[in-house]
Image: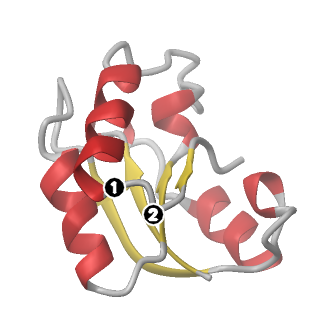
Amino acid sequence: MKVGIIRCLMTEDICPGTADFLVTREGKGAFQETGPVEIVGFVTCGGCPGKRAIPRAKMLIERGAEAIVFASCVSKGNPIGYPCPHYANMRDAVIKAVGPDIPIIEWTH
């Protein structure tokens, strides 16, 4: 499976995404059921409140993503311990925009 990962803009300067790349490559964390996956793109939400996540999710799909993944920095608040307060709205908007045939994975590690 090919995935596109959307991460938090606010944490990109303290997290290089190492754990995200590790769990996707090794099929761990959120990818235990799928096994190893290929990352086709690793982008930010664009900043609060995450409106750019919608066109970026579409772009990731155009570039081959078969699923959209929200990195744990967005949904769980890793590594700063503060989940995105806009996450539910952002996720729901992305689901509506990409349609029911594109799986959404809500965390990475």
Residue type at mark 2: give it: Ile
Q: Is residue 35 left or right of residue 48?
A: right
- Front-most of 33 and 79? 33
**Amino acid type of the residue that numbered disc 1 sits on in the rendered structure:** Gly
In this picture, residue 87 sits left or right of residue 3:
left
Residue ID for mark 1:
99
107 is higher (above) or lower (below) than 98: above
Q: Which x, y percent locates residue 67?
A: 50, 66
Where residue 96 sits, quadrant-wise, is: top left
Identify residue for label 2.
Answer: 102
The reply to whether dot 2 and dot 1 touch (C-beta < 8 Å) is: yes
Mark 2 surroundings: few (<14), some (14-19) or many (≥20) residues within 10 A: some
Quadrant position of the N terminus in the picture? bottom right
Residues packed near mark 1 inside 10 Å, few (<14), some (14 to 19) or many (20 plus): few
| Image coordinates for residue 44, horizontal then vertical, percent | 28, 51
Residue 38 visible within the image? yes
Query: Is residue 2 positioned above or below 105 on the image?
Result: below
Using the numbered discs, state the Cα–Cα distance from disc 2 to disc 1 in whole angstroms: 6 Å
Work out whether residue 13 can be spotted.
no
The residue tagged with tag 2: helix, strand or loop? Answer: loop
Q: Is residue 93 above or below residue 89?
A: below
Relative to the observer, which residue lies in front, 13 or 48? 48
Residue at left offset 54%, top offset 25%: 77
